[in-house]
Amino acid sequence: MKFSIPIEHITPADKDCVGGKAYSLSALNKQGFRIPYALSVTTEAYNHYTHRNGLHERISLELHRKNFHEMRWEEMWDASLRIRNMFLTSKLPDDLEQNLRGLIEKIFSGKAVVVRSSAPGEDSAGASFAGLHDSFVNIKGADAILYHIRMVWASLWSDAALLYRQELGLDVTKSTMAVLVQEIIKGEKSGVVFSQNPDDETQAVIESVYGLNQGLVDGTVEPDRWFLARESGRVVSHIPALRDKIMAPAPEGTTLVQLPKKIQALPPLNSEETARVFALAMQSEIVWGYPQDVEWTFHNDQLYTLQSRPITTIGQGRSGDERPWYLSLKRSFENLKTLRKKIEDELIPQMEGVANELARIDLNTLSDEELIGQIKEREAIFDHWEKVYWSDFIPFAHGMRLFGQVYNDTIRPEDPYEFMDLLSGAGMVSLRRNSLLEELADFIRNDEQLRQTLEQNREFLKNEDFSSKLDSFVESFGDLSCSTAQCFQGSDAVIRILLELASRPKDKIRTHDKNTEELSQNYLSHFPDDQQAFAAELLDLASASYRLRDNDNMYLGRIEGQMLYALREGLARINSQGTYAPDSLSAKEVIRMLQDPNYTPKTSAQKEEQEQAMPFKSVPRQLTGQPAGPGVCQGLARVILSPADLAAFKAGEIMICDAIDPNMTFVVPLAAGIVERRGGMLIHGAIIAREYGLPCVTGVPDATALIKTGDALTVDGYLGIVVIGT
Amino acid sequence: MSFRLEKAKDADIQKTIDVLNELFDSQSLAVLSTQRDSQPYCNLVAFIVTGDLKGLIFATTRATRKYENISSNSNVALLVDNRNNQISDFHDAMAVNISGTVVELKGDEREKYIQFYLTKHPHLEDFVRSPSCALMMVAVESYIIVNRFQNVMVLHVEK
């Protein structure tokens, strides 16, 4: 078996086992292009590794847990994270380790390298998937290089790759990955060149930055851009960049540093250099017969080709293809910092302002016409903020992911979600609310008379401390039932939940200082002194991201609540006799009913389940989802189809829902476990379950249909299994 | 020898042991039979047999029927065979019925045998290491070996 081939020994017969990138460089090398010295780690090495340690089948099990078309993006990220962790924690077989270590030490002997993916077919014409797989820059020493080879292998199963699995032909039984270990060229200026501009076929485009081109490739450093006529090589236009920062080699990896002021004024390339880069791209195009996308760098005035591949682009999908949007969520650290500032300083105060302003309007006093105006206005306001939610808040959740990745790479924990325990010290609004609820429940625990009063007649409260605390709770968080999306409950709900909370002992509540401090210190201790500031800043950013993942929806919930108040008011006017009770409200129908006295929308008649003619009955016994909160629990199911179901929640029941809304989390302290249809580790349900230490399984298709309230359940949050019945 | 093959010499016994080891190495799944209230119940389980053939190990989560059945009645039987779903199976295939009693492995024993179990089923690492998963050891009492359609031999494991 050939586990590795030095680049000068690659022949056309090796094309499939060294991958597109390595093959293309070896061919250019033979044509006289200057390239960094490199070693190809072949697909045979990958295959040997994954078969020997069971990874091959483990990946299959992970990816067949659920149908792909039933998986949400977040679930793909989770699957990918778990697979990545399998690679992180699985060692190389001895024979492979010896082969690679020997060659790496011999060839690179302490020199820094770039470890790049080189998947077979990856860079062939018509299938260029730049950026789906990982590359690591400035890696030193055999241990680190071997480790990063595993990281590149893992990126064969990156979430982006899973997303484009059809186009990539990703298949556990066939897909494989070669790696290129390349001597690093610490270029003074670097960039990419397209021999043909994707937007104008008469032009070529050069993008260039000072320093390493990692900053350009991942979008952190803005490049200068030149457009050239393909025919003549003449520069058509030059668009300069700000040029304040550059990506430079750090002791390990790369780091963003300030560019000296006097250099900032000059573009990275002079006219002679742009001509050389242009010529390089055109020569590569001649070799391959297709327009090329070439990565290059200048070092001591020598022009190196780092990689060359045919131009195709992803991320310009057909309309309705939301994958590019998803990929855009992979924001850089810098980008996330800017986004955080916007969210915290602008968006949230604005959302609070809007909700408060709407709350001040007394809907009772409006004419029907004015009420219609209010409904329309509120619907538009809600639509606006929902869009903001998608464009700014959800992308900010990537802060958690970025942190999770850095955390796992640095600490290499057994549990790939340990980072969530560290972040959970972040304190969300819903937790503050829940801890206030617990304080109120304490009054009831300690005052039997109060409990009886509340149970019998909720109007007369003699305990003034309790009443004033209850009042201030309602003031801060609104009537629980009405801070949810739909509110038909009346204020009884708070008291009912309080009685239920008081019915079980207090010690069940998880305190939130669980080792957070230790985890945090352990995390920081893994970074060298010069990276401490970065590590701390990333943790802070991730904590903000974690906190917001819950809070943002709560702010949106308040705006939605105001829209629903207006709808309720409309419904009350149409329906003063109470003859019409819809399952749900749409603004359109309420408006139409207010305008047209003869219009009655169809109520959704309860469909009677038809008796099956077949002499069989099918009953689910064990459902699989994603493990989202470790632990096992047993209890009766409480299926939550609408917020009204929350009020009936009893201590020790298992919450079954479509998707936990942060506004629903006040009953979580009562729950023994959580099962959610929507999948993912970073969704509210999973976050709050971990927060309370509850077993949780997410991503169970049809959970609310297959499980009925009162079913006896076992929730296995370690393996992501729900067992129905005993 | 701690095996007794009715009316057989030691050399025959060794040959049978070799055949069994070969079969167990070639198969990853066994049919496990448990019972409750005299109702039998079957499952597929990924198994491994200890080098001395005295123990068979499999794993199950605890919230399952088989675990529940075993908890109330530890007598189990397993079937391991090498059929190919071809007509030739009638003369060519071998099936082995394994009878014994089962206990759950705990503590250090569990960890020791998990390592052993993973040598054959490395892909089940997450499953078998889950705290909700039980590692079970069958103390084998007998192997009933069927080949050549109706040739049946019984290998007793002596205690």
Image (cartoon, grey):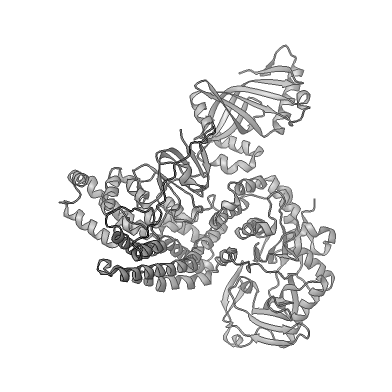
The location of residue A349, given as percent across then percent down, is 37, 71
Q: Is residue A39 visible?
A: no
Q: In which quadrant of the rendered view does residue A259 lie?
A: bottom right
Residue extending furthest toward the left: A462
Q: Which residue is drawn at the image coordinates 47% and 45% (left, top)? A: A705
Q: Toward the viewer: B130 or B81?
A: B81
Residue visible at 34% across and 68% down? Answer: A372
The answer to whether residue A715 of the structure is visible from this angle is: yes
- Whether A133 is drawn above or below A370: the answer is above
Image spot of residue A476 (x, y percent): 29, 62
Q: Is residue B63 above or below residue A301?
A: above
Q: Name the quadrant containing residue B140.
A: top right
Residue A157 position within the rendered picture, expressed as x and y whole percent measured from the top left: 64, 55
Q: Nearer the viewer, residue A167 or A225?
A: A167
Residue A342, given in percent of the width and then of the height, sits at 44, 73
A65 in relation to B28, above or below: below
In screen coordinates, is A244 left or right of B91? left
Front residue of A47 and A689: A689
The reply, left or right, for residue A575 in relation to residue A316 is left
Front residue (pair A95, A238):
A238
Number of callouts:
0
